[in-house]
Amino acid sequence: MRLLARVSGVLRLGVVALAGVLVVAILAIGQDLGPAPIVLREGEAAPQTVIAPAEVSVVDRAATEAARNQAAALVDDVYETDTQVTETVLDAVADVFAIVGLAAGPVLPPDTTTTTGPTTTTAETTTTAETTTTAETTTTAQDGTDGSTTTEQTTTTTLPPEPPARTEQILFVKDEYPLLRDQTIATLVDLVNGDVDRIAAGENALFPLVRQEAIDIAEEYLLDGIKTTELGAVRDALATRPRSLVLLPDEIRPQAEAALADVVQLYLQANRFRDDAATQLARQEARDEVTDFTVVFVPGENIVSQGGRITAVQLAAMEELGLLETGDEGSPVRALALVALIVVALAAVFVARIATDLWRRPKMVGVFGLLLLLAALAARVPELVSRDRVELGFLLPAALFGYLAANLFDSRVAVLMALPVSAFVALATGDLGLVVFSAAATLTPIPLVSSVASRAQLNLAVVFSALVHVPLAGAIAWFFYGSETVVLSAVWGSVGGIASGVVALGVLPVLASLFGITTTQTLLDLTDRNHPALRRIEETAPGTFNHSVLVGNLADRASRAVGANPLLARAMAYYHDLGKTVQPKYFVENQFGVTNPHDRLPPEESAAIIRSHVAEGLRLARSYRIPPDVAQGILTHHGTSLMRYFSHKAEEAHGERFDPADYRHRGRKPKTKEMVIIMLADATEAGTRALVQSEDPTSESIRELVESIIAEKVEDGQLEESDVTFGELTRIKEAFVDSMIGYYHTRIPYPGFPATRSTQPA
């Protein structure tokens, strides 16, 4: 076994290596990769004088970049004013004066009340320094006299407020603003206290003037804008050169000016900050305004003299004129070969990682290698047909490899094919537009053909894929070649899409037959009711045929629930009991109206007959050329399960001489999801049919039956070699239950219909 595995591994590697060599040969042969006449590099001494054969203009990138850097450096930083800072500073300055004014506020003494006696009139008292409140009480005499009225008046008077002491005022302000100088606080307190006397003397108050001047000075500086680097100088200017307050008396002016300057400079903040984004934008605009510095070489002018050191400008001029190659002679071919080999190796590694089951089969590796060769050949199509018309390049049959890979392998490998197809197009044409188109065109048919269930759907997939090629080719041509190429590119793209689909439909059967691969077309042929093997089952074992169809329905629904291949599962279900056509009467589903022949046979002979239908099925599958992938359903649908009916019968007959191993099937345990589904669907359909014969089925009884069947298979170890998870088993079970409930639904009996007693209408 180890030797066989080693041989298989060597064979796979050999196929990949051979494919790589042939791909390189296909891509390299006939390509114009001749070397340039001069080999020069920047900074080296020129081995010969190079003369310009034609006029050429090249950009001096170094000089251009230096000029742009200089222009950007001349742009000053852009600053923005923060209005929030301005408002904060002005509010802070105003708050200082508000606190000073609050400190000089009055302290109200206890109320003083005077009591008056009764009077006969109402008195109204108005005073300048006092607040007087008058209350009146009226009493009418009831002694039968002249009805005179007596009024009693009570007056409450609040005496003038007394201001706090100067020391208390200064301490109050000092607590609020400890950073203010003591002289500043004293000056402001004296100024606000002096306003009391000035107002009493009929003069104007000075404290509001000083307050407004402080706010105006702060606002003036802030409106001009203060940068962080300028804040210190502005504060120093305020301290050393305070603003003159000409409206104040000479005796208090110096102190008031110094106090005002101290308050403003203390709370003044920078409000003009550097805007990095705007600065960068301005400098970029300055850079953009600088045009490229160009150097022009006229025909016959020396680009570089022999022995001279080659500059970047000279090198660019020679490269523009096609006079040099920066590598060794022959390097393009070696580079092409290296890239092609790397692409082939990467594709092989990806297949080995994402499709391990396919990689282990040498013939599938051979098919993959063949697809790589065909992709290399297809990559040469544009240069053969396009000539000077880029639109003809869209005849590239890239979609062909999406069709082939999706049908011969699976959608994973089909998606992977976009890598080598687009890489080979890049190596063959160097056209970025065709590279993008080849990758997209390879992917286009994959979702359309990966889930087809009929030949009509397969044909529609070809049509839809060709339709998708129209906007795809048009959009790519518009982007890469201009609007004038859109129409013809779309036309040739659709032609290439149709040709790819037609060729794929013709090539697929050939490759499938040559390599023995089960494709979608193969499965569609197998599930056709006119297939000879299916006709044999239907004619010789009709009960088995009906059972197989029901198993196919169950398998299809369960496969869709767990992401398995529903078409493959249905085909496996149709042929899993093909061997029963050899001795159909020995199987209960074909015993309608006859006695069971097993009643006359010993249990070991009955077990041998039942067991033989697997071997007979494999023999018939080979004769009908049923693919191995489908024939696996015959081999694994019973696995090594116990034939419980005959084992129980043998145990009763033989007692201690009974060996359960003699009554087990001798197939193989299922490995794939499709095989597991066929095993469970076969047992479920048979078990449900038996349940219906013994009792009226309910949804609960069907669910219990399906759960018990799946649990029995798990406990018996029949699923231990498969990759099915318990979550997937749950989804399979739900699919089976829903299908069985739908199939064995309750019917309403018709009145007067034979064998019915109900009178309910349908």
Image (spheres, helix red, strand yellow):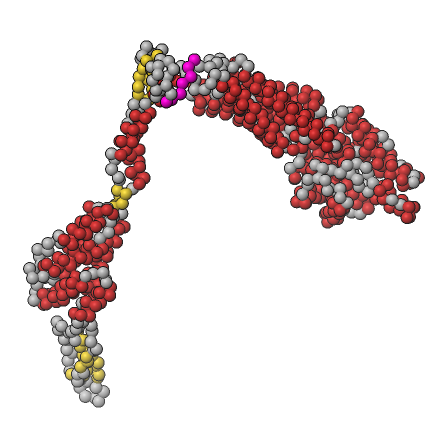
Q: Please tell me how many numbered marks the rendered image carries.
A: 0
Q: Nearer the viewer, residue 206 or 756?
A: 206
Image x and y of residue 168, in percent? 19, 70
Q: Position of residue 374 (x, y in %)?
A: 60, 20
State the predominant SS element of the stretch in magenta. loop
Q: Is residue 42 magenta?
A: yes
Q: Residue at x 29, y 34 (%)?
A: 283
In the rendered image of this protein, does residue 755 appear above or below residue 346?
below
Residue at the extreme bottom: 143
Tell me what residue is drawn at x 49 percent, y 15 percent.
Answer: 33
Q: Nearer the viewer, residue 287 or 215?
A: 287
Residue 19, image quadrant: top right
Residue 390 horizontal side relative to residue 104, left or right: right
**Quadrant in which residue 352 is drawn:** top right
Indicate the position of residue 255 as horizontal and vertical percent values: 12, 60
Of residues 683 and 414, which is closer to you in this image? Answer: 414
Location of residue 641 by image quarter: top right
Please tell me which residue lies in front, 135 or 252.
252
Q: Is residue 364 visible?
A: no
The residue depicted at 18 percent of the width and 75 percent of the height is 158
- Image height of 371 relative to 102, above or below: above
Outermost left residue: 250
Q: Quadrant of the N terminus?
A: top right
Residue 263 located left or right of residue 84:
left
The residue range painted magenta reads: 37-43
How far across and down, in percent of the image, does residue 505 sit? 64, 21
Whether 361 is among the magenta residues is no
